Amino acid sequence: MLDLLLPACCLGCAARGSLLCDACLVVTPAVRMPHPAPEGLPVCWSATLYEGAARQAVLHYKERGRTALAAPLAHALAFTIATAVPEGGLSVVPVPSAGRAVRARGHDPVPRMAALAVRHLGRLGRQVTLRTDLRQSRRVADQAGLSAAQRAANLASSLRVAEAGKARLSGRSGARVVLVDDVVTTGATLAEAARAVNEAGATVVAAVTFAATRRRVRTVFDHGG
């Protein structure tokens, strides 16, 4: 309702016209790996760093109900997926939020963003399918304030692929999967998601997030220099 009633202003520079202007959203796809990386973490790409306007966009999108931000975040995500895996068919598997978080927010932000990114890639001629088969298998504690080791222990065996999803993934001769999340911090969530998807018979070729935290990340390669 706010987006409909009030003029859109950029979260970064307050310029009118959009919630996140092109000048403030600088998309630089890169392999940004947490350091140290948890065991089982696939190559992890992100569109940008989790700071400034990008950080504000994630917070407003996830926690303050500004779902219109899904569009610019998804554009950045789609470009990063295309950079990370430039050829061939893919299954995009978003990491789900815990049920209590979805109820509190009123939406599940990552699958929404992933669905839009898949749509963008489809318009570019890529054979990309959205697979929302990843499920929470048990309740986990809030990750805020936990160390990397504590996060890994908290998330161990917390995700699974639904039975129907197993058939879809393994039935395609080991589908190539890109995992999608909003932010990578320690990498524990994506490592657990990769374990669950690989065990279901697919092959995780990359993880892609909108942003990566600077204090924990090591940039390996920046697209375009």
Image (cartoon, rainbow, N blue to C red):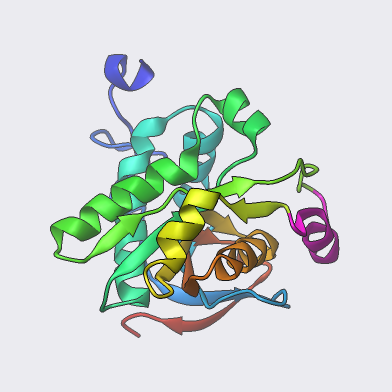
Q: Is residue 71 visible?
A: yes
Q: Is residue 163 magenta?
A: no
Q: Is residue 47 visible?
A: no
What residue do we see at 26% from left, 79% from top?
87
What residue do we see at 50% from left, 58% from top?
166
Q: Seen in the image, is 23 located left or right of residue 148?
A: left
Magenta extent = 145-157
Counting labels gives 0
What residue do we see at 48% from left, 50% from top?
164
Q: Locate the C terminus and report the quarter of the image it occupies.
A: bottom left
Residue 32 percent location from the top left of the image: 54, 74
The secondary structure making up most of the magenta span is helix
144 or 40: which is nearer to us?
Answer: 40
52 or 35: which is nearer to us?
Answer: 35
Residue 154 percent location from the top left of the image: 81, 54
What residue do we see at 42% from left, 30% from top?
66
Q: Locate the N terminus and report the quarter of the image it occupies.
A: top left
- Relative to 155, say whether 68 is above or below: above
Residue 34 figure quarter: bottom right
Residue 74 percent location from the top left of the image: 34, 50
Residue 68 percent location from the top left of the image: 34, 33
Q: Seen in the image, is 104 located left or right of residue 149?
A: left
193 or 43: which is nearer to us?
Answer: 193
7 or 125: which is nearer to us?
Answer: 125
